[in-house]
């Protein structure tokens, strides 16, 4: 399955996310780097703005060797706790989310799952618009507004993506963690929490801000309604990526360090876009 390095380990934490509701072609292998941007296969390949992570690969990308990235990776003072939380999240994905996603995949064809993923992505355009503006990416914000208008009308409420498929308007990545980085905020400690994907302190704050900006937080003000919607989104995404990490888990000598390295390298690249 292709695309993207743009929500454990992002996908290994997919299942754990579903339990709490926290944050292209249809075939082919994906890399560890792409997994860390966990998301629907059709959607992930649409990011413009130099989205190297969005390019699917059969193998994990090589490390950039960047000195700053290495320093960031080394700042993991909570490794003892993080390792335990990481193992817990992997078990949740293996024994809870993946079996549920398999059943879901059996009931719904990929085309329907992709439509659902497109719909969730279309609704969540607001944080991308705001963060592109805050980062001075006027063209990126314009693309997001254009995509929303086209997909909400010609795309039947966002279930289809004519903005990309017909007009060639690509998605623009933008999150508040990236915005904080642009303004000079350091990543802080690397941390893994049960039921959440890997984060740094900076990206955790950014994810909370993005959640507050999400239109679903206003359309569905009740916590349980939002949790149900988020769980549905995550199960749908996991179903579209059932084979993710299979080969990597079998070949990786140190899964925790590999995921940490890929995550921090990816965030460093995003920060520099």
Image (spheres, rainbow, N blue to C red):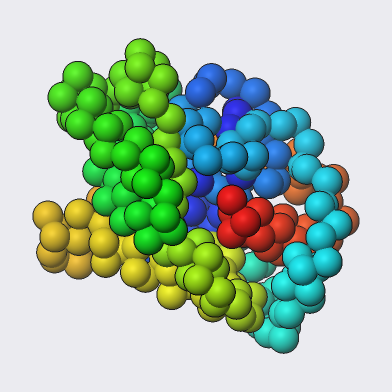
**Image height of 230 relative to 103, above or below:** below
Front one among 29 and 42 = 42
Give the farthest residue toward the top. 166
Q: Is residue 233 visible?
A: no
Give x and y (percent) for residue 248. 76, 44
Quarter of the rendering occupied by the N terminus: top right
Give x and y (percent) for residue 240. 48, 33
**Which residue lies at the image location 60% right of the left edge and 77% below the top edge?**
186
Give x and y (percent) for residue 211. 31, 63
Q: Count the numbered circles shown.
A: 0
**Which residue lies at the image location 43% right of the left edge and 75% below the top edge?**
205
**Image height of 78 relative to 177, above or below:** below
**Image height of 67 relative to 266, above or below:** below
- Tell me if 104 is positioned left or right of 87 in this view: left
**Image height of 271 relative to 157, above or below:** below
Which quadrant of the figure has residue 247? top right
**Which residue lies at the image location 34% right of the left edge and 69% below the top edge?**
209
Q: Is residue 188 visible?
A: yes
**Which residue lies at the image location 26% right of the left edge and 62% below the top edge?**
213
């Amino acid at each position: 399955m292709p695309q993207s390095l743009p929500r454990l380990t992002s996908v290994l934490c997919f299942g754990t996310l579903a339990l709490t509701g926290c944050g292209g072609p249809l075939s082919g292998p994906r890399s560890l780097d792409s997994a860390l941007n966990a998301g629907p296969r059709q959607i992930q390949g649409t990011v413009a703005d130099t989205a190297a992570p969005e390019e699917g690969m059969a193998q994990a990308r090589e490390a950039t060797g960047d000195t700053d990235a290495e320093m960031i990776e080394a700042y993991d003072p909570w490794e003892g706790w993080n390792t335990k939380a990481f193992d817990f999240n992997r078990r949740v994905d293996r024994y809870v989310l993946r079996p549920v996603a398999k059943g879901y995949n059996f009931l719904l064809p990929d085309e329907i799952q992709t439509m659902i993923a497109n719909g969730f992505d279309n609704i969540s355009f607001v944080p991308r618009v705001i963060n592109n503006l805050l980062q001075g990416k006027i063209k990126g914000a314009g693309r997001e507004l254009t995509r929303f208008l086209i997909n909400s009308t010609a795309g039947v409420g966002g279930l289809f993506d004519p903005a990309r498929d017909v007009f060639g308007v690509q998605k623009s990545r933008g999150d508040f963690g990236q915005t904080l980085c642009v303004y000079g905020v350091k990543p802080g400690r690397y941390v893994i929490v049960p039921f959440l994907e890997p984060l740094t302190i900076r990206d955790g704050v950014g994810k909370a801000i993005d959640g507050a900006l999400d239109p679903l937080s206003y359309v569905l003000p009740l916590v349980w309604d939002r949790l149900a919607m988020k769980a549905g989104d995550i199960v749908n995404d996991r179903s579209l990526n059932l084979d993710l990490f299979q080969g990597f888990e079998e070949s990786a000598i140190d899964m925790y360090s590999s995921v940490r390295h890929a995550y921090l390298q990816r965030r460093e690249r995003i920060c520099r876009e």
